[in-house]
Amino acid sequence: MDLTTQAAAAQAPATAPTASASSPTPSSGGTPSASATAAPASAVGRSSAGGPASGTAAGAPLRLALVVGSNREGRFAPVVADWFLERAAAREDFTVDVVDLAEVDLPTALSGRPGAAVRAELSKVSPRLAAADAFVVLTPEYNHSFPAALKSLIDWHYTEWQAKPVGFLSYGGISGGLRAVEQLRQVFAEMHAVTVRDTVSFQNAGQHFDSEGRHRDPAAPEAAVKTMLDQLAWWGTALRDAKSRRPYGG
Ligand SMILES: Cc1cc2nc3c(=O)[nH]c(=O)nc-3n(C[C@H](O)[C@H](O)[C@H](O)COP(=O)(O)O)c2cc1C
């Protein structure tokens, strides 16, 4: 099932370009090298740049943006993303938009006055981050941290993250991506975001999914994703309600 397209089709197109860099401080990051991990065909990576409309009434499903944090050639990310999207689609408390870093090319050199080419790239993602009520960040672990492309996306934005909950879906080798997640918690605190306690983590991920993207022993990850999404729903609803009464003051 093409879950990415299904999710995007239910939502309004992205709005006008927004250049939302809030910090002129340049960032830098490592360059992930290629590895041999191959991924089966996936809906992720083929999505259009659709995004949710802004403004949601209380009681409406929360608009959840899944941020796919790996853009590595041959990446495993789509397997985990599709697994998650299938679980999220079964819930009535969320609508899901997929913000895939393989579909956006943001420079690591930040600018308060980005040129046309950078504004065009930002227009693919910024309105969709702004419209989200909650985020799930899908991250692998590279050298005990998270991908440089993900840091770049975070740094190019600021208010888009504020007073919103963030859940983590991680994978990697022996660590299951948990070291990347712990670092992301520090980064999102600086963004005034609220990270939820429970994560979904896949250790040695490539070994645990079959060639169709099915998890070989699904009970534990099924329970973990329910817990994480329940926490995200609580925080997302609470923060949306609070912001409707009083704007977040920063
Ligand atoms: C440059 C690089 C560094 C990595 N470093 C770690 C690491 O520190 N810890 C770990 O558990 N796995 C590490 N791995 C394994 C990756 O987490 C694993 O291959 C994962 O599938 C990468 O995600 P991707 O395929 O979506 O890019 C590394 C992989 C790469 C390519």
Image (tube, rainbow, N blue to C red):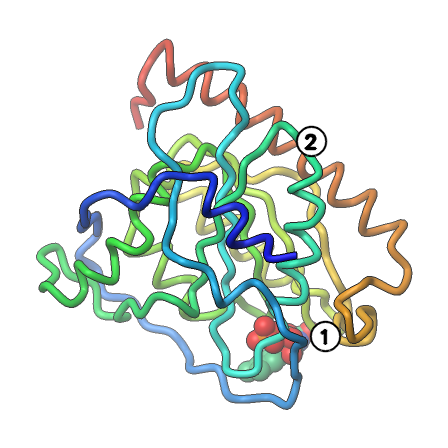
Q: Which residue is mark 2?
A: 230
Circle 1 residues within 10 Å: few <14, some 14–19, many ≥20: some
Vertical position of residue 246 compared to residue 197: above or below: above
Q: Quadrant of the N terminus?
A: bottom right
Vertical position of residue 107 compared to residue 119: above or below: below
Q: Residue at x 82, y 62 (%)?
A: 215
Q: Which residue is mark 1?
A: 173
Q: Residue at x 70, y 57 (%)?
A: 83
- The quadrant holding residue 26 is bottom left
Residue 142 visible within the image:
no
Q: Amino acid at mark 2?
A: Asp
Residue situated in front as seen by the camera: 92 or 209 = 92
The response on whether ligand 1 sits within 8 Å of label 2 is no
Q: Secondary structure at mark 2?
A: helix
Residue 41 visible within the image:
yes
Vertical position of residue 78 compared to residue 240: above or below: below
Q: Secondary structure at mark 1?
A: loop
Q: Can you give x and y, in whole percent of width and height, for residue 195 in the image?
A: 55, 40
Q: Can you give x and y, in whole percent of width and height, for residue 113 in the image?
A: 8, 57
Q: Quadrant of ligand 1?
A: bottom right
User: Which comes before the other along the chain, label 1 or label 2?
Assistant: 1
Q: Quadrant of the C terminus?
A: top left
Q: Can you give x and y, in whole percent of width and height, for residue 65 in the image?
A: 48, 45
Judged from this view, the residue extending furthest toward the top is 245
The response on whether ligand 1 sits within 8 Å of label 1 is yes
